[in-house]
Amino acid sequence: MITSVLVANRGEIACRVFRTCHDLGIRTVAVHSDADTTALHARAADTSVRLPGKAPADTYLRGDLIVKAALAAGADAVHPGYGFLSENAGFARAVLDAGLRWIGPPPDAIEAMASKTRAKQLMGIQPLADITEADLPVLVKAAAGGGGRGMRVVRRLADLEAELATARAEAASAFGDGEVFVEPYVENGRHVEVQILADTHGTVWPLGTRDCSLQRRHQKVIEEAPAPGLPPELDAEVRALAVRAARAVDYVGAGTVEFLVAYGRAHFLEMNTRLQVEHPVTEAVFGVDLVAEQIRIAEGHPLETEPPRARGHAVEARLYAEDPARDWSPQTGTLHRLCVPGPVRLDTGYTDGDEIGVHYDPMLAKVVAHAPTRTEAVRRLAAALERAAIHGPVTNRDLLVRSLRHPEFTAARMDTGFYERHLPDLTEPSPDPHAPLAAALADAHGRSRFGGWRNVPSQPQIRRYAMAGEEHEARYQHTRNGLEADGVRVVRADAGLVVLEVDGVERKYEVTRYGEQVYVNATALTALPRFADPATQHAPGSLLAPMPGTVVRVTEGLTAGTPVKAGDPLLWLEAMKMQHKITAPVTGTLTSLPVTPGQQVEPGMLLAVVQEA
């Protein structure tokens, strides 16, 4: 019997495993890096063990340190979560060799399937070699791990070597394994997968399908179960192939077999020998706790002969601290508040006041809605996200809401090219035009010495705010009849709630302020000073760091005075386990390059200056 589990992971998945362990009466052990000393997962466990350092290579990818931590804390089992070492057969063997239980598949099964090259060979598929123009487009893909890291689409043969180098670097950083391979890139297909659960007694459950077609950078954003609109024969085919893959390697535990469905055919992609990020939608539909089942299987218990019946539909959205309008750039800073109204499930590794750092994945939470029908589940999830209070770094919340309400998605006609086609429209700013006025009125009330308004005439008051990348002015005036503000009637105004009557309709604005950052309902604003600080001004053509990170590479031969063309790569930043290419915004001359490889940069730091020709 398992009595104490160490989770060899962090963040949301560690918290999620701890939750089930606590329900089962199992003690929990967390490991944490120095960057995660006060992280929610470290606080949620009964015991935690420090892994010295901040980078994954020094902490969460150090299997030897994690095994020592498990033994020191008295754990008798290890759950790997997902990512990091979850598909590392050597780590699984080290856990077993230490006399601990491994809550996952046998190392041999991981070895056979965790390398995508070996998995494809097992299924009779060979990766591409000696790439030519006729093979394009192709996909460069990490052999170990997943989550979109170490993946690059190549459309020009001249770009292949550079993209191979970038993919290897990302894969090595994220998974400790830089092996990559190349396969044909099937565009605009659907990403469909099958959840499997297998015990040590020969029973394999195919727990339905999931559709994970809405992706950015080959990382899933919105997932649902079951996959809508699959023809019955295709649904049966992918389930049968999933069971075949599991039986081929004597699989045990939870796993996922992934396919790309295009033109009525299912193309095998890979088998993930671990729990998936999107497992909650399957749990909701089948009424099972997959983590509890993993633990029971690790204890040797058999599954029932037949899986439970599916009921209803579930949709999950991944909430990221990132800016989709700026090439999905990850964001950092303090998460002041995260509150999502029900009835939805919220899986998160953060709580109010936590810091979003640069070292790890930018996912803040997963929000899951379950309902009798797909239409109801989608509507419920969109409404919950729209009403959520998310105060802190920029997130993809608006993108998620718009995606869930897009006609292609509501009609279940989406594919993996969804964001390539629709991203500009989905990220078009549409802030509430009355948000600055509400912010100004709440701020004025909050600063009033007497807690109310003066009942005498006054000069117009002006406050300036940055909103959606633009500067806005809010004007209001105290009169004997109350407040006047550009034809908008002020019904109520205090420090936390402003009610405005616009065209005969009263609208409520909840206002929250953190220093100069102001949130009016779901709109974020920054209060601006009356006069700009000259020290913050930059020369035209300045490229500023969009996020904290490390300069990992500068284009060879690039120095001040070098002519560049718009779109030419200048340097690469690594942040949150991804590499981000910084390119020339215009054709002209590079006049300044003040950074070097290995240098740490903060948001707003000058990276380069390109003077337009």
Image (spheres, rainbow, N blue to C red):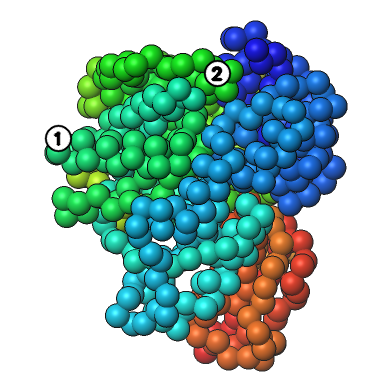
The x and y percentages for residue 272 are 47, 43
Report the front residue among 146 and 271: 271
Q: Disc 2, disc 1: CB below 8 Å?
A: no
Q: Which mark is residue 232?
A: 1
User: On screen, 336 above or below 537?
Assistant: above
Residue occupied by mark 2: 300
Tell me where residue 480 appears, x and y as whole percent.
50, 22
- Residue 520 visible in the displayed image: no
> Three-letter amino acid code at disc 1?
Pro
User: Residue at horizontal 65%, vertical 8%?
Assistant: 25
Residue under the point 66% across and 55% down: 176
Mark with earlier residue (2, 1): 1
Image quadrant where residue 35 sits: top right
- Give the label, 2 or 1, closer to the camera: 2
Distance between the alpha carbons at the discs numbered 2 and 1: 34 Å
How many residues crowd mark 2 within 10 Å: few (<14), some (14–19), many (20+)?
few
Q: Secondary structure at mark 2?
A: loop
